[in-house]
Image: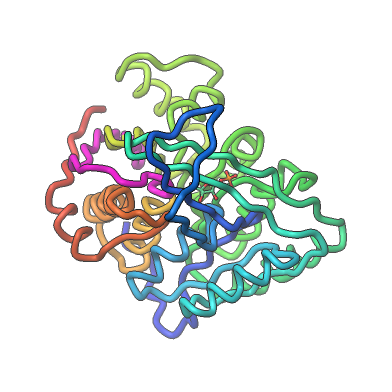
Amino acid sequence: MKIRDYKGVTYVILTVTLNPSIDRSYFVKDFEKDAVFRTKEVKYTPGGKGLNVSRVINTFKEPVTATGVLGGLSGQFIIEKLDELNIENEFVNIKTNTRSCIAILSDDGSQTEVLEPGPKISEDELANFYKSYEKLVDKCEIICGSGSIPQNAPVYIYKRLIEIAKEKNKKFILDTSGETLKEGIKASPYMIKPNKDELESIIGNSIDTEEELIEALKSFHKYDIELIIVSLGADGSVVCHNDEIYKVDAPKIDAINPVGSGDSMVAGIAVGLSRGYDFEKTIKLATACGTANAMEKETGKVNINNVKKLMERAKLKKIG
Ligand code: TA6
């Protein structure tokens, strides 16, 4: 799993967030429907999956650049926040305002999210993005394409981005769902990270046993995807690497805010790849990042010391 030496490349990892958002996290006591809550604690973070990935990668001081499309006052807020965090960013500006997403986190451990659909983008804005993306791909080794897409963007947009990356011999990590995922896998990205529901929607069958999950993963051989991680939340994940299948147990923790744990896993994989870690160490790093994120109040945030400790407790077992 060693990748080419890339000394001298400006930055190594490019994250693509086609539908960024201002993530608003509200911490509410005894949250329930049909009631009014005054919260004392609110966190605004530059979000959308790809930006959560960027912030976690940045925590490891790995060179990363964030791209995608941004518009309006929300877009400006996100750029200011990325600049404050010293995260390189090259977004294509669009006319329509970037969305917000809210997460209501209650002391009973419940997590309620409302995700806005995001803006519409014009043909010209989309063409500008493709042009900018082609240039950025030349300067990186690993691309993480994460999250949903703007309302009227073509469902094959990730497929196109993966094809461009592969033409230039770059690794593309795809983390999305629905039709864009179904289209994206046709381009054989390096890695996908569906959860069980997303995997079931692709194969068109329910998965109720570990055996059925192994069969489902084996059926992906035809897509020639080197790494598939089926995230199972606090239960860890099942990983298929070059047709070998592993159950990964995540260390047990008291979760505070699991929003962004999947994004943090993707960041862990990208960091492991960019550092040339072997398969097992990379998966343990990703698992530790996903778990460490849930220990923080802020979405898409990890404490490096926690990650180091959690990596020692992550366990891989070959199951197929
Ligand atoms: O995974 C968490 C999260 O990134 C939130 O921060 C929120 O921005 C949401 O997911 C966006 O997901 P979407 O699939 O709509 O791009």
For residue 144, side relative to residue 124 (left or right): left
* Position of the N terminus by quadrant: bottom left
- Residue at x-position 30% and y-position 66%: 276
In percent of width and height, residue 6 lies at 41, 76
Q: Is residue 160 magenta?
A: no
- On the image, which quarter does residue 164 sit in? bottom right
* Magenta-tinted stretch: 238-262
In percent of width and height, residue 154 lies at 77, 45
Look at the image and name its color scheme.
rainbow
- Residue at x-position 71% and y-position 49%: 118
In percent of width and height, residue 237 lies at 31, 36
- Residue at x-position 51% and y-position 60%: 44
For residue 158, side relative to residue 39 (left or right): right
- Front in this rendered view, residue 163 or 201: 201
* Position of the C terminus by quadrant: top left
- On the image, which quarter does residue 77 sit in? bottom right
